[in-house]
Image: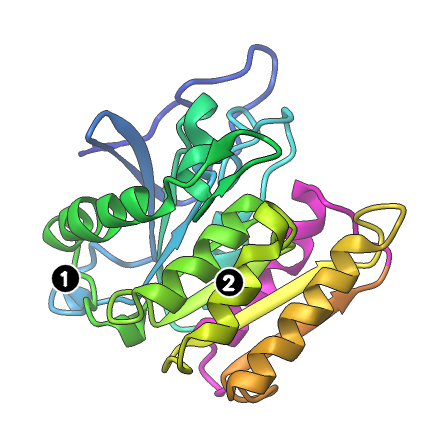
Amino acid sequence: MIPVIAPLPALVGVPCTLSGDIRALAVSGRTVLVRLPSGYDSPANRNRRYPVFYLLDGQNVFDGATAFIGGNEWKADETADALEAIGKIEPVILVAVYNAGAERVNEYTPVRDAKFKAGGGADTYGKWMAGTLKPTVDRTFRTKTDATNTAIGGSSLGGLFSLHQSLTVPNVWGKAAVLSPSVWWADRAVLRTVSDAPKKPIHLWVDVGTAEDKEGVALQDAQVLRDALIERGWKPGADLAYREISGAGHNEPAWAARFGDVLIFLFGKDGR
């Protein structure tokens, strides 16, 4: 484990925007950046343990220099710093897990999509996250290891993966942030996962922008997903937060703009 002192890897000409105490891990050859709360190393906190939020597409989470589109990142580190400083959320460890590039689609999708002739590796990748990555993080840092204090989140296909993992492995992931999920994948197979399984004791944040596509398909899909979750027993305002963000597109700036609300719902001090 090393402190991060430069983007890895960086886009030429794009400045590093890492903020706060960021540590780097290499787990099974994959880059993982870990943002620790302010005061983590203080003697006063030496026995304190923290909830953990695992975030997919880690290149885009903290640093504009490593983001897929240079400069467009979630600002998750700055947002968590600000909310913790004013007492809006519990101090939380953020774990940004880099995607595998060309293997991203396969890793993030639960079933194969015949149209794209790709996908279906989510269960395998999920086993790595739960069985290799999470134990590594738990050994390395002072974490709260139970599902109630462990969240997973992502956007687009990352949102699809996060929803699937929380529904199928709720003993590991007790909370999920599902931003602009790719419900459309494989003829909306995830809706069958929701409808066919009993309700799980997990808290879900689900959102969508109203301008993600010209036809409004993403918005309609998110509404169908919301209705399916409610039908299975999730209660809006309690264990389900559903948001439609007016004018928001399908991009990092849009997700960054609402990440604070995600943190408050999942880790807020004042309840949900």
Residue 263 lies within the magenta run = yes
Tell me the residue at 53%/75% (across/down). 265
Tell me whether circle 2 and circle 1 mark residues in contact (CB < 8 Å).
no
Residue 38 position within the rendered picture, expressed as x and y whole percent measured from the top left: 35, 57
Residue 209 visible to the viewer: yes
Residue 178 position within the rendered picture, expressed as x and y whole percent measured from the top left: 55, 60
Three-letter code for the amino acid on which mark 1 is drawn: Pro
| 4 versus 211 height, above or below | above
Q: Is residue 204 left or right of residue 100?
A: right
Part of the protein shown in magenta:
247-272
Q: Quadrant of residue 157?
A: top right
Query: Which quadrant does the N terminus fall into?
Result: top left
Residue corresponding to mark 2 = 177
Q: Is residue 111 left or right of residue 169?
A: right
| 15 versus 149 height, above or below | above
Majority secondary structure of magenta residues? helix
141 or 138, which is in the foreground? Answer: 138
Tell me the residue at 85%/55% (across/down). 216
Residue 231 lies within the magenta run = no
Residue 215 position within the rendered picture, expressed as x and y whole percent measured from the top left: 88, 50
Q: Residue furthest right?
A: 214
Q: Which of the labelled discs sits on residue 43, or is there none? A: 1
